């Protein structure tokens, strides 16, 4: 749970570092999700994006592992 909280926290920080004039909707509601787009985010925002991604993937893997362990032990 902590991993996902860190991911969400860093994603919120990422959005504080959008390029001037870029709205939340322009950066978020895209087919590519704004992934690694320097025209949307500053270098600091892209750094927070990488951290959020790392912890989000880790959290998802841990949730899957917990689900598997729960099924096995049930």
Image (cartoon, grey):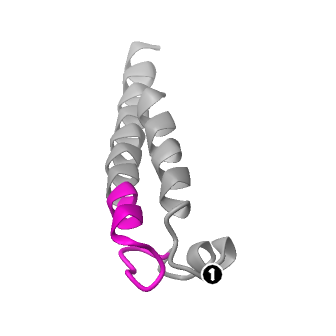
Residue 32, given in percent of the width and then of the height, sits at: 47, 80
Residue 35 lies within the magenta run: yes
In the image, what residue occupies the spot 66% across and 77% down?
Answer: 23
Q: Quadrant of residue 21?
A: bottom right
Residue 3, given in percent of the width and then of the height, sits at: 41, 34
Would residue 56 appear left or right of 11 to someone viewing this image? left
Q: Residue furthest front?
A: 20
Camera-side residue of 51 and 61? 51
Residue 42, given in percent of the width and then of the height, sits at: 40, 72
Camera-side residue of 55 and 39? 39
In the image, what residue occupies the spot 46% across and 48% down?
Answer: 10
Would residue 70 appear left or right of 50 to someone viewing this image? right
Q: Is residue 54 above or below residue 21?
A: above
Q: Is residue 56 above or below residue 59?
A: below
Q: How many marks?
A: 1
Q: Is residue 33 above or below residue 61?
A: below
State which region is magenta: 34-49
Q: Secondary structure at mark 1?
A: helix
Camera-side residue of 43 and 63? 43
Residue 66, given in percent of the width and then of the height, sits at: 41, 26
């Amino acid at each position: 749970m902590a991993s996902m909280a860190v991911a969400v926290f860093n994603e919120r920080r990422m959005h504080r570092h959008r390029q001037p004039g870029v709205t939340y909707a322009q950066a978020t509601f895209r087919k590519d999700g704004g992934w690694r787009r320097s025209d949307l985010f500053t270098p600091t925002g892209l750094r927070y994006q990488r951290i959020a991604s790392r912890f989000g993937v880790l959290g998802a893997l841990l949730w899957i592992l917990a689900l598997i362990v729960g099924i096995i032990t049930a």
